[in-house]
Image: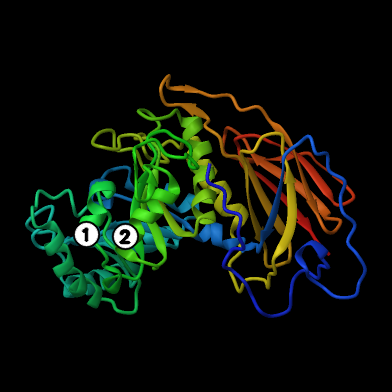
């Protein structure tokens, strides 16, 4: 798996949250020497220096793809609206349709009920899906007004290389500046590519015309931290997260990145329980890699097409475990407001295997939250069977004695249940498997 061992970018220069004297990090002055924990050499140990992310960054990273043009006039639309509102997701992604008042009304209802904003996908002449689908700057502006000024981003056309247009590169490059000019105060997302491997180099560097890189990343039933499964190219192994980011940067350069579409099919790729486990980890893995938003594809199973069962709710509007997982994670991490000041924290993880992954957060009241999970395959893509993942006892050691320690773990129903975490001096021990475990504690 891909493990990031670096100091994350988030940092506040004000008063430090942690006053640590860490001789191993060369920090502090006076104050004595921090005792070195005694750790058995028989179990692998990982040393980490990490600045905690604001807890709300996880909640804010979740986006949901919707298809209001498909079900906006359906008899069950109000049930769909209620399901979306129940998730707590603040960001939706859907198309901008030209002169479709019914769509505008339904989209506005969905956004208001969910208290969400929209990433609006546009279209361009030459590569359009339909003769009526190209969007002009005036149409984008009119759509924003029609939905109550709830646009928060404008997105280039989706899958621009899959439009039966031999001149798709030129048509895309020609179109982007006009689309970007429509709402200059809003972020403008780069186009996604259907065949990122072959076509990212063809599109080339368009970073001057976009504010964010953008990719659709689907894993064909593999775990979020998969090392990849295809032949290597200059970006590495096809399918791996570093590969996807590298390919995206061929177009967007150093701009920040979103994933416009990501998720799992709970019929053709994995079962519903694995879909839930993988999505709960996918959100963490993507955020860990610096992906600012992951738009899950999608809200509801469409019962056909390319993604018949990628939804968080089924075609009959009943919820899957994945729905509960997303709602639980958003609710747990939701902590809007000015983030707490945070400084780098040094700790070590002792684990029987080397597949335990982690990400550290801080809430605005100073509570630290360490997310732990076993980023190993939970599904065999060949046999199409679940892979049982045994729990491992993981010991996390700090340079201080953590207090007010509490732990929860996602269960197969997608809800957080209380979990036992034991403390001994500077060490917290907790059992971790392929479900997400969250350990909360205070340093002072």
Above-or-below relation of 98 to 299: below
Outermost residue, top direction? 383
Front-lying residue, 341 or 74: 341
Q: In this rendering, would 418 be left or right of 100?
A: right
Query: Residue at point 60% right, 59% down?
Result: 6
Q: In this rendering, would 213 be left or right of 87?
A: left
Front-lying residue, 145 or 79: 145
Q: Is residue 124 visible?
A: no
Quadrant in which residue 310 is drawn: top left
Residue count near mark 1 (Cα–Cα under 10 Å), binned few <14, some 14–19, many ≥20: many
Residue 413's disc number: none
Residue count near mark 2 (Cα–Cα under 10 Å), binned few <14, some 14–19, many ≥20: some
Element type where label 2 sits in the image: helix
Q: In this rendering, would 311 be left or right of 143?
A: right
Point out residue 74 in the picture as x, y percentages from the top left corner. 26, 44
Mark 1, residue position: 203
Element type where label 1 sits in the image: helix
Point out residue 224 in the picture as x, y percentages from the top left corner. 48, 42
Q: Are marks 1 and 2 in contact (CB under 8 Å)?
A: yes
Query: Residue at point 34% right, 68% down?
Result: 153
Front-lying residue, 267 or 173: 173
Mark 2, residue position: 250
Point out residue 363 in the picture as x, y percentages from the top left corner. 67, 63
Q: Distance between the residues labelled 1 and 2?
A: 8 Å
């Amino acid at each position: 798996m891909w493990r990031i061992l670096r100091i994350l970018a988030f940092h506040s220069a004000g008063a430090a949250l942690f006053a640590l004297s860490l001789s191993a990090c060369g920090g502090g002055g006076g104050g004595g020497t921090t005792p070195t924990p005694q750790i058995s050499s028989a179990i692998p140990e990982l040393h980490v220096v990490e600045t905690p992310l604001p807890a709300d960054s996880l909640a804010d990273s979740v986006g949901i793809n919707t298809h209001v043009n498909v079900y906006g006039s359906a008899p069950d639309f109000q049930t769909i609206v209620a399901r979306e509102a129940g998730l707590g997701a603040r960001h939706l992604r859907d198309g901008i349709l030209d002169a479709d008042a019914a769509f505008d009304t339904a989209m506005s209802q969905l956004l208001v009920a969910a208290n969400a904003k929209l990433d609006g996908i546009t279209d361009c002449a030459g590569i359009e899906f339909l003769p009526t689908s190209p969007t002009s700057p005036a149409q984008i502006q009119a759509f924003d007004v029609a939905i109550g000024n709830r646009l928060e981003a404008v997105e280039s056309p989706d899958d621009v290389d899959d439009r039966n247009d031999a001149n798709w590169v030129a048509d895309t490059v020609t179109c982007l500046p006009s689309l970007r000019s429509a709402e200059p105060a809003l972020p403008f997302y780069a186009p996604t590519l259907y065949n990122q491997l072959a076509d990212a180099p063809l599109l080339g560097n368009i970073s001057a015309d976009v504010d964010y890189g953008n990719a659709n990343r689907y894993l064909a039933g593999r775990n979020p931290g998969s090392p990849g499964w295809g032949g290597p190219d200059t970006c590495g192994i096809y399918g791996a997260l570093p590969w996807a980011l590298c390919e995206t940067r061929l177009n967007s350069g150093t701009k920040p990145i979103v994933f416009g579409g990501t998720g799992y099919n709970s019929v053709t790729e994995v079962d519903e329980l694995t879909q839930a486990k993988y999505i709960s980890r996918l959100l963490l893995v993507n955020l860990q890699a610096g992906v600012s938003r992951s738009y899950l594809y999608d809200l509801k199973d469409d019962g056909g097409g390319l993604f018949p069962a990628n939804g968080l709710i089924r075609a009959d509007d009943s919820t899957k475990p994945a729905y509960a997982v997303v709602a639980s994670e958003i609710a747990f991490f939701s902590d809007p407001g000015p983030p707490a000041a945070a400084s780098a924290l040094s700790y070590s993880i002792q684990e029987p295997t080397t597949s335990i992954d982690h990400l550290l957060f801080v809430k605005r009241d100073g509570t630290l939250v360490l997310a732990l999970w076993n980023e190993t395959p939970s599904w065999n893509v060949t046999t199409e069977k679940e892979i049982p993942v045994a729990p491992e006892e993981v010991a996390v050691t700090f340079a201080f004695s953590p207090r007010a320690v509490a732990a929860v773990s996602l269960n197969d129903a997608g809800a957080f249940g209380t979990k036992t975490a034991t403390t001994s001096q500077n060490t917290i021990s907790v059992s971790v498997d392929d479900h997400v475990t969250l350990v909360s504690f205070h340093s002072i």
